[in-house]
Image (cartoon, rainbow, N blue to C red):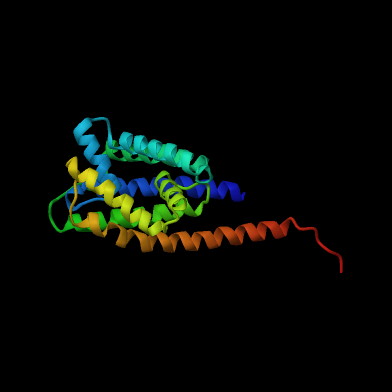
Amino acid sequence: MIVAIRWGMFFVGLALFSLGISISINVQHLGIHPWDVLNVALYEKVGLSIGSWTIIISALLIIISWFLDKSYIKLGTFLNGVLVGVFVDIYLYLDFLPVATYTWIDYLIIIVGIVIMGIGGGVYNAAGVGSGPRDGFMLSISDKLDASVGKVRIITECLVLIIGLILGGPVFLFTFIFTFIQSPIFQYIYGRLREEITRLEHNNQNKHLPKTRA
C-alpha cells in the first residue's frame, strides 16, 4: 500500500513538475530556470527537442554521479531523467498551454509555471524513490568536495547558466528569481508530504504488530 502511494506520488509529481517547465518555456522571453536555459539553447542551436536535451543532460549527470557516489542513484533517478523530458515534449506537442502575449499576463503565466514546478518537485521528492539526476549530481559533488549543497547548487547552476547564455538561451528577469519563488513552495510541499508518508508508514507498522493480551 505504502509502496503504491510512493510511486503514485512520484509519477504525479513528475507530471506536475514537467507541466510547470512547459508553461515557463512558453513565456521564455521573461527568463527560465538555468537548466532549462541550457536545454532550450541546445534545442535552438543543434536541433532535436527540448525534452530530448533534458534526457541527454540527465543521462550525463547520472553517469557522473554513478562514478562519484552510487548511493544517490536509484530506479526513480533513471525514471526521472527520462520521464521529465518525455512529459515536456508531450505537453509542448499537444499545444494546449497558455502562450506568450507579451503583456503583463505573461508574468502571471510564468509565476503559475514556477508554482506548479515547486509543487511537483516537492511531491516527487517526498515519494523517496530516488533523487533527480540534477539533485543526485549536486549531492555527490557536495560529498566529494565536503562542501555545502547550497554552495554546490549555486556554482553548478551559475556555470550551467553561463553556458546556456553563451549558446543564446533565454535569460532574463525570472532566470534570477526562479529559485526564490520555487524553493519555499517546494520545501513546504515536501515537508508536509514527508510527514504524511511517515505517519502512514507508522500506522501500517502498528497494524502488523502482534497484539498482546491483557
Classify residue 172 as left or right of residue 155. Answer: left
Between 106 and 83, the residue placed more toward the observer is 83
Number of numbered discs visible in the structure rendering? 0
Residue 135, percent from left and from top = 42, 49
Residue in the picture at 22% in, 39% down: 41
Classify residue 73 as left or right of residue 184. Answer: right
Which corner quadrant of the image does residue 109 belong to?
Answer: bottom left
Residue in the picture at 27% in, 52% down: 158
Q: Residue furthest left?
A: 102
Residue 189, percent from left and from top = 44, 60
Q: Residue furthest bottom?
A: 214
Q: Is residue 101 visible?
A: yes
Between 86 and 165, the residue placed more toward the observer is 165
Between 172 and 68, the residue placed more toward the observer is 68
Classify residue 149 as left or right of residue 210. Answer: left
Residue 35, percent from left and from top = 30, 46
Q: Is residue 109 visible?
A: no
Q: Residue furthest right?
A: 214
The quadrant of the rendering that contains the C terminus is bottom right
On screen, 203 above or below 128? below
Classify residue 202 as left or right of residue 83. Answer: right
Residue 19, percent from left and from top = 34, 47
